[in-house]
Amino acid sequence: MKIKLKKKFVVFVLLVLMITGCGKKTSGDVKENFITKIEKKNSYLMKGTMNITSNEDVFSYNVTAAKDKENYRVNLINQINNHEQVILKSGEDVYVVTPSLNKSFKFQSEWPDNGSQGYLIDSLVKDIKNDSESKSEKVDDGYIITAKVNYPNNANLISEKIYLNKDEDITKVEILDESGNVKITVNYTSVDFKPTFKDDYFKLESLIDNNIPLEEETSKTIDDIVYPLYLPKNTYLNSKDVVSTDEGNRVILTFTGDSPFTLVEEVSKASDEFEIIPVFGEPLLLSQTMGALSSNSLYWTSNKIDFYISSNKLTGTELLTIAESVSSGALSVAKEK
């Protein structure tokens, strides 16, 4: 009788161990589960926040990112000044719309498939699949998936950490530089995989609203010229010209040396009628705004000033680095006023 009880006890223990072992998730399972879950979804609506660190400054945005089949829409609202920009992919067309200026860039672009996008969940899946060394690990409050990123015009960004809770739902993404410093953080507040969109939500017409208050024109002249806080090695200011136009004055700074470039500045002005500006290039995320990057130039607006850099020598990453230093300079000037 005792022998039978022991046998039953041993069988019971083995059965429990087998069941426990079968139910235990491995890090590989978590990564594959995340990929499978997202690839099954044709649409989603994400809401959250994004923090971008540039030097010692942190710029924070409210983010709404939506996908419906092949269409995308990302709303970015600066938490300090409520300045809003919208990245829109509608069919084959890609736009960056600034409602308060009544303007939009129109791109011939493969966005968002041409690089990593921390606020688009399906872009994260592409990063994981494209990195044969991507991995996941268990932590106290869930899991972390680590993968390389692809920012063609910002070589400083190297990898990302995707945070999942214990239910394997995404909660946060951190994008890091080669030193392991977190440069961009996207916090996922909510994700709806069965959203309902208005019929025109992914159409440009939905963003053309005559009731949106336009930015007030404070001045037609630039009182304080903004100089780059960073210059490439052996590059220096050669000339400064101020040209009068019908729209006000235009500042032209010419830099020469090993990495020559031209920087143009003028006061931004809202268009009376909605304006579409064609660009043969890509949307580019700067710390303070969205810019338009072409093969040899970068255009962006910061603190009510339009900036334009052009160079036949500089790469996209170098143009971005100079632009960030210019924006930091513009921010410093604005704070002093």
Image (cartoon, helix red, strand yellow):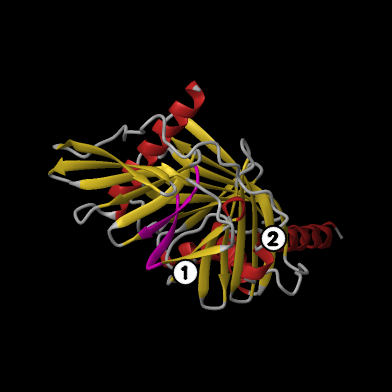
Percent position (x, y) of residue 17? 70, 58
Give the number of callouts: 2
Using the rendered view, name the quadrant where residue 208 is placed. Answer: bottom right
The amino acid pointed to by label 2 is Asp
The amino acid pointed to by label 1 is Asp
**335 displayed left or right of 139:** left
Question: Circle 2 is placed at which residue position?
Answer: 209
Q: Residue furthest right?
A: 1
Helix, strand or loop at label 2? It is: loop
Figure check: 125 above or below 149: below
**Residue drawn at (68%, 49%) of the image:** 213
Say which quadrant the N terminus sits in: bottom right
Region of the chain picked out in magenta, as a range: 279-293
Can residue 130 be seen here?
A: yes
Figure check: 98 above or below 325: below
Using the rendered view, name the quadrant where residue 25 is placed. Answer: bottom right
**Residue drawn at (74%, 75%) of the image:** 199
Eye-nearest disc, 2 or 1: 2
